[in-house]
């Protein structure tokens, strides 16, 4: 079965739980983006994703991409679907109107990309970096580069790549060797080879804009010596640049997306931003991409749940405990083991969505709020929570999809039902845009501990103040927020004597934070107007099967922080 977006589920979280229409209306650019307009955008996006993109998913996986004579051919239907994507204005959903975009909130774009990934992850890899490339050029490119490239990227007329990784330089970007030599006309000559480049070559757009991490002559070693170059596939006057696709990788999943090895042979490019400040410019792309990767995890989990839930309602095996034996074999959805799998994934999907959508709303606040302090607090929230979402939601996207495959039994392991593709496609999300281990270190070591957790504690207090201590569920969340602040202080103190300790505990700490955020999310969902039986069932599953992880991780952190003999 193809994935089906459900706009009503999303509107409940945005409108009833988060109060998104009122929050957005308080931001000047969105004063006229009322609930009706938001609903209309979501309805149209659901139709496009469900009718145009989702039906291409299986064929794209089975056919894959082909490299012939240096050119990549994408699966049948992809080029037409992408042109329909552009014609519908979807690439520029949140881009500024003066750049050719629609100027709509980032949170609506977040929902769109969640649905796209759920429906057809391989296809979604093509436009997946447009938003990041747009923001990178908008903030760091020269006026000349903006005039030539920004509008075409904003509208999706041209696609973009992010060329970081080299065979010897993955997470350690300071090892990058690609060289860029300045020319008398102000351009650069870029030489080097990049690997794992999503959409490095394809037939979807006439040009591809490569943003390449490189090193200028006499640049110091390490990350401070890196610069960023814009290198187009095709020059302004139609000549092909010296950019070559050497091969496309044979991958576990994402067969519909060409993952390329790209070679730059004295290719013409231009500096983006300041020399030696390439990582700062590139991280504008990466931070935007990490939230969208988190949403990929949520979307893929929802796709897996939809398949497993539909199958479980129809498949009959044995008699479920408490069921009428005279009625014969029960739908496996009634068997406790299967019900637990399905309900736990539902708890992760809706809880993860709420946190991700809150973060996307905070991105809108950080960009557009009139009050500087509000912008600062929103940016701080995004800084803390984005790595948590990226790591935890992608891990659950894979683990949960595997659990959903289990619902099918042996039928899940064969191609007929499509669930095995979801498992394969989901696995890479734990690796790209910074491995999940890197996300955990980023959270604890780079963001939480430098001020001994004071800034993070302030962000948690905002969540606490949104709860009602007179409700048992809310009071429980407040206690856990306090315990998380206490454990953060313990780590900060213990790290003085054992500097390696935060690195050892980073994964446990990130999981502790995510479960706490999920507890907050479900406390909010349950009390929202319109919450019904499905939400109550998922909330019960969360408290019974997911929330106990908090105590386990807290015990690990507490024990590790004790003085060593």
Image: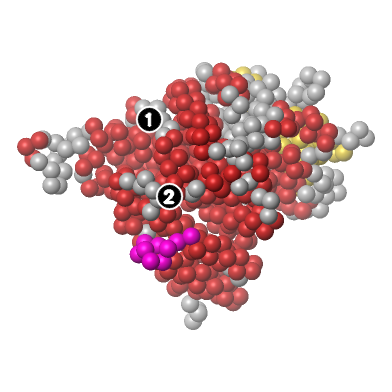
Q: In terms of depth relative to the viewer, which is nearer, 240 or 448? A: 448
Residue that badge 2 annotates = 351
| Residue 62 found in image quarter | top left
- The residue that appears at 48% across and 30% down in the rendered structure is 43
Q: Which numbered circle lies on residue 49?
A: none
Q: Which of 360 and 222 lies nearest the eye of the viewer?
A: 360
Report if residue 434 is visible in the image.
Answer: no
Is 447 contained in the magenta span?
A: no
Across and down, in percent, residue 325 comes to: 8, 40
User: Farthest residue in the right direction?
Assistant: 184
Tell me residue 281's x, y (percent).
73, 46
For label 1, the residue is 418
Furthest toward the left, the residue is 326
Q: Range of the magenta residues?
A: 466-474
Frontmost residue, 547 versus 473: 473
Q: Quadrant of residue 178?
A: top right
State whether residue 309 is above or below residue 158. below
Q: Look at 41% across and 66% down and name the residue there.
A: 469
Distance between the alpha carbons at the discs numbered 2 and 1: 25 Å
Q: Give left or right: position of 537 versus 464.
A: left
* Magenta span main SS: loop
What residue lies at 29% left-to-right and 46% top-to-bottom?
Answer: 533
Please tell me whether mark 1 sits on a helix, a strand or a loop. loop
Q: In the rendering, at what x and y percent does residue 410 appear?
A: 28, 35
């Amino acid at each position: 079965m193809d994935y089906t977006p459900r706009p009503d589920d999303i509107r409940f979280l945005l409108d009833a739980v988060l109060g998104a229409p009122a929050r957005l209306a308080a931001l000047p650019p969105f004063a006229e983006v009322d609930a009706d307009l938001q609903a209309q955008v979501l309805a149209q996006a659901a139709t496009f994703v469900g009718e145009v993109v989702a039906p291409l998913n299986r064929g794209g996986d089975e056919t894959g991409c082909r490299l012939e004579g240096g050119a990549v051919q994408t699966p049948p239907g992809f080029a037409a679907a992408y042109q329909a994507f552009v014609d519908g204005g979807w690439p520029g959903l949140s881009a500024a109107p003066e750049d050719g975009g629609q100027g709509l909130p980032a949170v609506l774009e977040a929902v769109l990309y969640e649905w796209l990934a759920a429906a057809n992850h391989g296809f979604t890899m093509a436009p997946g970096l447009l938003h990041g490339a747009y923001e990178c050029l908008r903030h760091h490119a020269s006026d000349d580069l903006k005039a030539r490239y920004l509008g075409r990227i904003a509208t999706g007329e041209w696609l973009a790549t992010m060329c970081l990784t080299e065979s010897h330089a993955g997470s350690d970007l300071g090892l990058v060797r690609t060289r860029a030599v300045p020319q008398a006309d102000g351009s650069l000559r870029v030489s080097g080879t990049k690997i794992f480049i999503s959409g490095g070559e394809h037939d979807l757009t006439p040009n591809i804009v490569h943003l390449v991490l490189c090193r200028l002559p006499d640049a110091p070693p390490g990350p401070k010596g890196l610069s960023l170059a814009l290198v187009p596939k095709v020059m302004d006057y139609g000549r092909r640049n010296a950019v070559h696709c050497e091969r496309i990788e044979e991958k576990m999943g994402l067969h519909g997306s060409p993952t390329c090895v790209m070679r730059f042979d004295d290719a013409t490019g231009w500096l983006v931003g300041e020399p030696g400040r390439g990582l700062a410019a590139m991280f504008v792309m990466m931070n935007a991409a990490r939230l969208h990767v988190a949403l990929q995890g949520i979307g893929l989990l929802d796709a897996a749940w939809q398949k497993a839930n539909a199958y479980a309602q129809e498949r009959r095996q044995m008699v479920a405990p408490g069921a009428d034996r005279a009625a014969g074999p029960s739908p496996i959805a009634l068997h406790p083991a299967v019900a637990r799998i399905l309900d736990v994934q539902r708890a992760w999907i809706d809880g993860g969505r709420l946190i991700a959508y809150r973060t996307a709303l905070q991105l809108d606040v950080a960009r557009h709020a009139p009050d500087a302090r509000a912008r600062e607090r929103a940016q701080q929230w995004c800084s803390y929570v984005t790595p948590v979402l990226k790591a935890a939601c992608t891990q659950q996207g894979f683990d949960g999809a595997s659990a959903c495959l289990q619902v099918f039994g042996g039928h899940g392991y064969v191609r007929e039902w499509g669930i095995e593709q979801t498992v394969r496609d989901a696995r890479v999300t734990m690796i790209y845009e910074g491995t999940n281990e890197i996300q955990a270190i980023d959270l604890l070591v780079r963001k939480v501990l430098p001020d001994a957790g004071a800034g993070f504690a302030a962000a948690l207090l905002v969540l606490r103040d949104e709860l009602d201590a007179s409700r048992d569920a809310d009071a429980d969340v407040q206690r856990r927020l306090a315990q998380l602040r206490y454990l953060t202080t313990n780590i900060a103190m213990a790290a003085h004597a054992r500097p390696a300790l935060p690195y050892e505990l980073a994964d446990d700490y990130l999981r502790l934070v995510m479960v706490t955020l999920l507890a907050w999310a479900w406390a909010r969902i349950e009390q929202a107007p319109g919450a019904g039986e499905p939400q109550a069932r998922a909330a019960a599953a969360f408290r019974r099967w997911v929330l106990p992880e908090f105590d386990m991780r807290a015990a690990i952190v507490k024990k590790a922080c004790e003085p060593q003999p």
